[in-house]
Amino acid sequence: MKKRFVIGNWKMYIASPSEAKKFALTLTRRARLFRGLEVWVAPPFTLLSLLQPTLKNTSVRLGAQTVSAHKAGAHTGDVSATMLKQTGASFVLVGHSDRRALGETDALIHEELLQTIQAGLTAVLCIGEREHDHNGSYFEVISSQLSSALSDFPRSATRKLMIAYEPVWAIGKTAQDAMNPGELQEMQIFIRKILVDILGRESARGVPVLYGGSIEPQNAHLLMQEGGVSGFLVGHASAEIESFIEILSACKK
Ligand code: PGA
């Protein structure tokens, strides 16, 4: 049976060490109820080392929200993939739209992806159009973001690759503003087709495609049942333990 994933992107919502620890402890205790569901969390850099002992030997995986495009050297403020690995992170969100909005280009995201893979971490490549225009040019945007990020991607590393489709117009709003299952189904089929074109049928087959953009307890179940995706990347609703647990519960088989 195919795995399902729910990744919490804490952004800067949870900042205090004590709050983060309390959240992680509760989550590990309650996530045990959701067998067959992969539960991952991506806190800010400052909380990674702190949460590592709490999450070690549990089913909840720890990851980072971004990564440097460089291996080492004079890059003030950057954190390399190897450094992230040392904190206990096992995955990275690469190319999130919050980062693209700050000026991260497709070329930079390509480098970040390679750094992530070379360090042996799983890359969750985030893609998404800014606008959902009526003539469908957003398909072109998605295709070009994928082709650019995945050019020269080593096929042997596809088991460390995931795609998170997050249309920017649906992020940070409410369940009513998220995609509907029909639109999502259509988009995930398109993404899968592009992945096959880039990576080949065999390598593309196992790459999970997730959805993000105003996933809340109210829409998680229907989008999971009818959207055709392998799970969710959840922002604001992942920073509150009860709503995150409700989303996990909506995604279990
Ligand atoms: P949201 O954020 O769930 O708050 O819309 C999703 C994301 O940006 O990853």
Image (cartoon, rainbow, N blue to C red):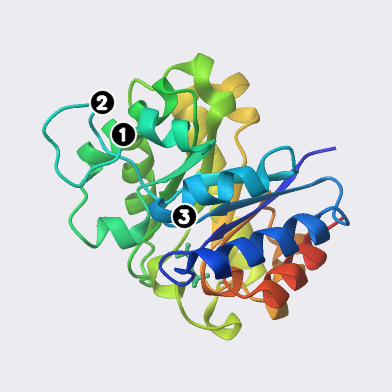
Residue drawn at (27%, 31%) of the image: 111
251 horizontally vs 166: left or right: right
Q: In this orientation, which residue lies closer to the viewer: 209 or 78? A: 78
Q: Earlier in the sequence, mark 2 or mark 1?
A: 2
Percent x, y of residue 104? 21, 50
State yes or no: Cβ of the residue under disc 2 lies below 8 Å from any atom of ligand 1: no
The answer to whether residue 222 of the structure is visible from this angle is: no
Q: Quadrant where the C terminus lies?
A: bottom right
Percent x, y of residue 234? 57, 64
Q: Quadrant where the N terminus lies?
A: top right
Q: Which three-letter amino acid code belongs to the residue tagged 2?
A: Lys
Percent x, y of residue 117? 43, 25
Q: Which residue corresponds to mark 1?
A: 80
> How dense is the environment of label 1, judged by Cα within 10 Å: few (below 14), some, or many (20 and up)?
many
The reply to whether the C-beta atoms of the residues labelled 1 and 3 are less than 8 Å apart is no
Q: Which residue corresponds to mark 3?
A: 47
The reply to whether the C-beta atoms of the residues labelled 3 and 2 are less than 8 Å apart is no
Viewer-nearest of discs 1 and 3: 3
Residue drawn at (55%, 28%) of the image: 160
Percent x, y of residue 15? 44, 68
Q: Tell me the distance, in whole angstroms, between the alpha carbons under discs 1 and 3.
A: 16 Å
Q: Secondary structure at mark 1?
A: loop
Q: Which three-letter amino acid code belongs to the residue tagged 1?
A: Ser
Residue drawn at (75%, 55%) of the image: 28
Q: Tell me the distance, in whole angstroms, between the alpha carbons under discs 2 and 1.
A: 6 Å
Q: Which three-letter amino acid code belongs to the residue tagged 3?
A: Leu
Image mark for residue 28: none
